[in-house]
């Protein structure tokens, strides 16, 4: 970054993206599932231990595939947090499913596992935990509930690449897991994502759904002598240009994560005095969670005016952001979903959060300035 603006996000380039894209061009294979896609699948499978990884256009597409795979029917209920990105819910609403929103935990802003069981009805089909900020949900408790009630488990691990829970990579703990490679995430391809298929019984259908509902994958493996329409699907696979770009990023994924963790830790140390004065609360990462520094956020004390703070940042050419407008209070969320009880923490905490600029290459000087402006506005 040359000027003195500090953006919220700045996509990191490893330097090999265009080289691999040129190679894909040279290979003359530009449709999906070519050599670069296979490399990316191999990396994801080796690094996460998932049975099958499939690149998609986005995490949204991976979630939509999940809804098709679980055969979600109109009226089926899916339990999820309200504090999440719209795709978590929208993917199921497309199949006629009804998102049932439960409240979050105060520490991690993840779904409160203790509320899930009471939200289950005879129509409940699945639970979708969202690993916010790459910090895992309490998966042991959630798995136990899913088993007891025979529910499917889909991890929205959009933010969770290279993060883990008790040593288990996020996205590999449920029946299915969805990753995002959107340019605001840690490892990027502009738009992009992957579905991790952990239940071996779902692998073949996942391939079919992703290939327009056909058994084209089996045809290319010489397992069938022609390919035909097998079931409802769509085109969920990215072309090789995207996969080539992503490959350059996956090769560097460990270094990217390491660098982000350094910036994360630095924010965490610099902000300790403000937390000590009770002006804000820093992010909390439970012992059993290895996170990936996807984001650094703070929760402002209730008496602090967030809007005024954001304007002050803007005057200093710093662009932090806040999110999410809780889904249960959004127009579509009210129309298609329902809230389970009072979502008191979701409402309260979503109004106090501020996400600080976080990207590979953020300098110490830039971080110091962010912290300086923040502390000047609070004290
Ligand atoms: C980014 C994100 C998504 C959507 O990812 P895309 O790849 O942009 O479709 C879904 N869920 C969560 C929690 C996200 O952060």
Image (tube, helix red, strand yellow):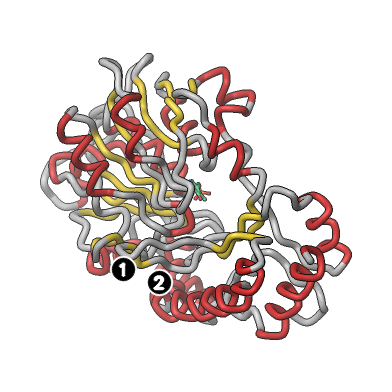
| Residue 377, percent from left and from top | 81, 64
Q: Is residue 139 above or below residue 144?
A: below
| Residue 22, percent from left and from top | 50, 74
Q: In which quarter of the image is residue 226?
A: top left
Residue at the spot of label 2: 250
Q: In which quarter of the image is residue 350?
A: top right
**The disc label shown at residue 39, or none:** 1
Of mark 1 and mark 2, the one earlier in the sequence is: 1
Mark 1, other Cα within 10 Å: few <14 / some 14–19 / many ≥20? some
Secondary structure found at label 1: helix
Is 268 in front, or is 77?
268
Q: How many labels does the image show?
A: 2
Q: Residue at x 47, y 23 (%)?
A: 341
Q: Please state if 183 lies on the left or on the right of 114 as rendered.
A: right
Report the residue that reaches farthest toward the bottom.
364
- Mark 1 vs mark 2: in front: 2
Is 275 in front, or is 104?
275
The answer for how far apart the CA atoms under marks 1 and 2 are is 10 Å
Mark 2, other Cα within 10 Å: few <14 / some 14–19 / many ≥20? some
Cβ atoms at labels 1 and 2 below 8 Å apart: yes
- Location of the N terminus by quadrant is bottom right
């Amino acid at each position: 970054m040359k000027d003195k603006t500090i953006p919220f996000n700045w996509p990191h380039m490893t330097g090999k993206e265009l080289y691999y894209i040129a190679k894909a061009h040279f290979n003359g294979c530009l449709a999906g599932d070519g050599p670069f896609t296979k490399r990316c699948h191999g990396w994801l499978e080796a690094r996460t231990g998932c049975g099958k990884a499939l690149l998609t256009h986005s995490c949204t597409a991976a979630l939509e595939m999940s809804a098709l795979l679980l055969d979600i029917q109109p009226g089926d209920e899916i339990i999820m947090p309200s504090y999440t990105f719209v795709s978590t819910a929208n993917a199921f609403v497309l199949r006629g499913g009804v998102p049932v929103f439960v409240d979050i935990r105060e520490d991690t802003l993840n779904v409160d596992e203790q509320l899930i069981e009471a939200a289950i009805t005879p129509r409940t089909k699945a639970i979708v935990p969202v690993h916010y900020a790459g910090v895992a949900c309490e998966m042991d408790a959630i798995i136990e509930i899913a088993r007891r009630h025979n529910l499917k488990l889909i991890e929205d691990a959009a933010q969770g690449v290279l993060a883990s829970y008790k040593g288990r990579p996020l996205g590999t703990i449920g029946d299915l897991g969805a990753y995002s490679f959107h340019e605001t995430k840690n490892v990027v391809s502009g738009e992009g994502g992957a579905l991790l298929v952990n239940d071996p019984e779902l692998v073949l259908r996942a391939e079919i759904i992703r290939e327009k509902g056909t058994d084209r994958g089996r045809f290319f493996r010489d397992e069938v002598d022609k390919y035909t329409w097998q079931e409802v699907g769509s085109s969920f696979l990215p072309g090789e240009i995207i996969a080539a770009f992503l490959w350059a990023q996956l090769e560097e994924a460990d270094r990217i994560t390491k660098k982000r963790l350094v910036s994360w830790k630095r924010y965490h140390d610099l902000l300790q005095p403000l937390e000590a004065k009770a002006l804000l609360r820093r992010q909390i990462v439970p012992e059993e969670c290895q996170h990936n520094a996807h984001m650094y956020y703070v929760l402002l004390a209730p008496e602090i005016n967030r809007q005024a703070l954001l304007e002050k940042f803007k005057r200093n050419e710093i662009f932090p952001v806040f999110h999410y407008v809780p889904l249960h209070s959004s127009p579509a969320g009210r129309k298609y979903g329902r809230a389970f009880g009072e979502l008191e923490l979701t409402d309260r905490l979503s109004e106090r959060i501020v996400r600080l600029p976080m990207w590979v290459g953020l300098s110490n000087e830039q971080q110091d300035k962010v912290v300086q402006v923040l502390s000047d506005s609070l004290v």
